[in-house]
Amino acid sequence: EEWGERSVERFRGMFAFAIWDADRRQLLLARDRLGKKPLYYLNDRDRVIFASEIKAILEVPGVSPQIDLTALSDYLSLLYVPAPKTIFESIRKLPAAHYAIATRDSLEIKPYWDLSFEPRHNTGEAQMMDELVGILDEATRMRMISEVPLGAFLSGGIDSATVVALMARNSDQPVVTNSIAFNVSTYDEAAYARKVAGRFSTDHHEFAVTPEAVPIVEKLAWHYDEPFADSSAVPTYYVSKTARQNVTVALSGDGGDENFAGYRKYYFDLKENAVRNLFPKTLREPLFGALGRIYPKADYLPQIFRGKSFLSNVAKDPVEAYFFSASTICEEDKRKLLNPDVLARLGDYRTSELFHKIYRNAPASDHLSRLQYLDIKTYLCDDILTKVDRASMAVSLEVRCPLLDHVFMEYAARVPSSLKLHGGVSKYIFKNAVAALLPPDITSRKKMGFSIPIAKWFRGELREMAETALFDRTSPGAGLFDINHVRRLWDGHLSGMRDFSQPLWILLSFQLWAKVFHTGKIQ
């Protein structure tokens, strides 16, 4: 009542809400700065429909479930549908950091916040580290306010360990920590989580998980509302489910990689750019493009021998190369996968244009900062935060992210890029800032992905269900893809000579989603 729509500028944390102003006869819709919470809407000639779940909007009479083919194309590349699109033509996401005002005559959508990487801090490195820890300590302390049992996710990585360390500093009771252990050593971080738990004398709960592949992928198709193919949704669901056994609110370490350039892809992009800048465009494109085309694709060999992507990327402009690295199914392979009539309707549409637009408009002056901004606006919001929100809400667990506090992010964004990715060391300033809080081998250990053995699953417990779903010609999504190309991928993967698990997981996730939303229930 006092601040109107400008009230969103004063809020700190996650939210999505709708307020009806009876005096002005207008509706205010708003979503938090990072898009931690969902808000979908449909706007047609005489009504605005809004909800926190797409499935609620689909229940309204007259709502068209027509698939947006550009959103399908985006999904095949990115594993998710980027805002403001949804998989349905008529339904849209309210973008993060935006509010909408709906009246009888119009729906106006406006931004209220953005993350600027300029100007840079001009203080010394030691002072920046002290201030980073101070702001993060405050952000953590604020998120510990709770009237229900509160704890933390603890993977054993530097981000979750830092959050637990700061929680321990601000609590007179042992912090309740939760981690999961897998029976496949490649994916298991439980030993590191135990070390952190011991350091801070937490009330630690570890759950051994043997993921049940078939039931969980069908269940997740229902909860995510759209096709969503980030396979780490599976362990995220399990860690949320296990944490919910002893807490109602959990703090997580999400955000460290986006704030401080922690992903390995930034390092590889830096190397590509170094080579790219040695050659003029007129020489670089034909030379490296030709080398990339003839170099064999060897995804079964160690990383050092996989030069095809490197050569192909050096030939491209920096944004197109980054999009290629971020894509699971490239444009060339997408054209093989989609049916000719779908390709004809897509015309010259390219998902990479989204990356170019965000990169161009980034409030940053250097390449790495522009890439971070791009990831925050796409991958963080529409993949990471979507994954965590839907998986945790499926078990009635609230997840809070101190590293994604907007005040902390505004400070981190202005830290010079050279102190984030420094001499090949990612998250350089953050690791140094929190080093005194953590066991030494936590800050120095190699990053470990939060993933599942889907390649093995397809050749084992998922095989029968996946084959049925992928080749069911009666499926609502069957007509979109070239069934012969899908068969080539499937047979090639089962042979063990190639790893096509990623495109197969994308296709399976889509077909399961199509089945669930066509029938309205999990079979």
Image: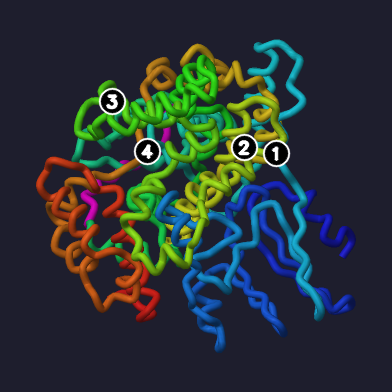
Distance from disc 3 to disc 1, alpha carbons, whole Å, reads 34 Å
Q: Kindly identify which residue carries mark 4.
A: 204
Name the front one of labels 3 and 1. 3
Helix, strand or loop at mark 1: loop
Which label sits on residue 373? 2
In this rendering, position of residue 115 left or right of residue 477: right
Q: Amino acid at mark 3?
A: Gln
Among numbered discs 4 and 2, the one appearing first in the sequence: 4
Assess whether mark 1 and mark 2 are in contact (beta carbons under 8 angstroms).
yes
Helix, strand or loop at mark 3: helix
Q: Amino acid at mark 2?
A: Tyr
- Nearer-the-camera pick, 83 or 384: 83
- Dot 2 alpha-carbon crowd within 10 angstroms: few under 14, some 14 to 19, many 20 or more: many
Query: What's the residue at 60%, 37% (across, down)?
Result: 140
Q: Kindly identify which residue carries mark 1.
A: 115
Assess whether mark 2 and mark 4 are in contact (beta carbons under 8 angstroms).
no
- The answer to whether residue 229 shows anywhere in this view is yes
Which label sits on residue 132? none
Among numbered discs 3 and 1, the one appearing first in the sequence: 1
Q: Position of residue 485 (x, y in %)?
A: 24, 58
Q: Relative to 159, does residue 461 appear above or below in the rendering?
A: below
Q: Kindly identify which residue carries mark 3.
A: 303
Magenta region: which residues? 200-212
